[in-house]
Image (tube, helix red, strand yellow):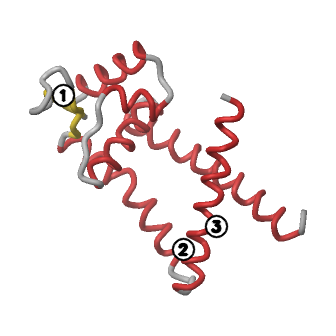
Amino acid sequence: MPENRAALVTLLQEFALETERFIAAASAHEGLHRTDLGALGVMAAAATAGRTVTPGALRQKLSLSSPATTALIDRLSAAGHLTRARSNSDRRQVHLELTEKSRRTGSKLFAPLAGNITTALESFSEDEAAMLCRMLEKVIEATATARTSVA
């Protein structure tokens, strides 16, 4: 493997480890399980896209069993981080919605990270940023492919 590509793989591994450390620290700071924080992240991403998340979709995104998903939802609901709402079109379906408390918690935890990353990326031109986006899309795709091969 060429030297720069090997260095890039090493840096991506270090980034993944540092991200895991950040999630562990943020979870501990708020008294949440790592999976709780992951669930809130999935729900926040869906909300940003104008969607809600069902328990089944959350289970699939987090690779949890049905009982573990129920326990997770119960924990987050009891802690005031989410509410359950019945679908207007199908009353059997439940949608999970973030509360204002979870939005405040997410902002408090992740705004500094987003700010630091934004500052770090400001040193790149738009063309460089576009290339980095393409590279990360390919890396994410490769990682997902690798995950399915071991699952």
User: Which of the two marks, 2 or 1, is nearer to us in this view?
Assistant: 1
Q: Residues within 10 Å of mark 3 (few under 14, many from 20)?
A: few
Q: Position of residue 102 (x, y in %)?
A: 26, 41
Q: What's under tag 2, amino acid-wise? A: Ala
* Disc nearer the start of the sequence (3/2): 2
Q: What's under tag 1, amino acid-wise? A: Arg
The residue lying furthest to the front in this view is 89
The label number, if any, that marks residue 110 in the structure image: none
Q: Indicate the quadrant where residue 40 lies.
A: top left
Q: Position of residue 122 (x, y in %)?
A: 50, 81
Q: What's under tag 3, amino acid-wise? A: Met
| Left or right of 138 in this view: 5 | right
Element type at mark 3: helix
Q: Are marks 1 and 3 in contact (CB under 8 Å)?
A: no
Instruction: Tell me the CA gap for discs 3 and 2.
Output: 17 Å
Of 150 and 44, the residue lying toward us? 150
* Disc nearer the start of the sequence (1/3): 1
Q: Position of residue 57 (x, y in %)?
A: 37, 32
Count of numbered marks: 3
The residue lying furthest to the left in this view is 88
Element type at mark 2: helix
- Which residue is rendered at x = 43% and y = 63% of the image? 114
Instruction: Tell me the CA gap for discs 1 and 3.
Output: 38 Å
Q: Which residue is mark 2?
A: 120
> Vertical placement of 36 versus 14: above or below?
above
Q: Which residue is mark 1?
A: 84
Q: Residues within 10 Å of mark 2 (few under 14, many from 20)?
A: few
> Vertical placement of 115 versus 51: above or below?
below
Q: Indicate the quadrant where residue 146 lies.
A: top right
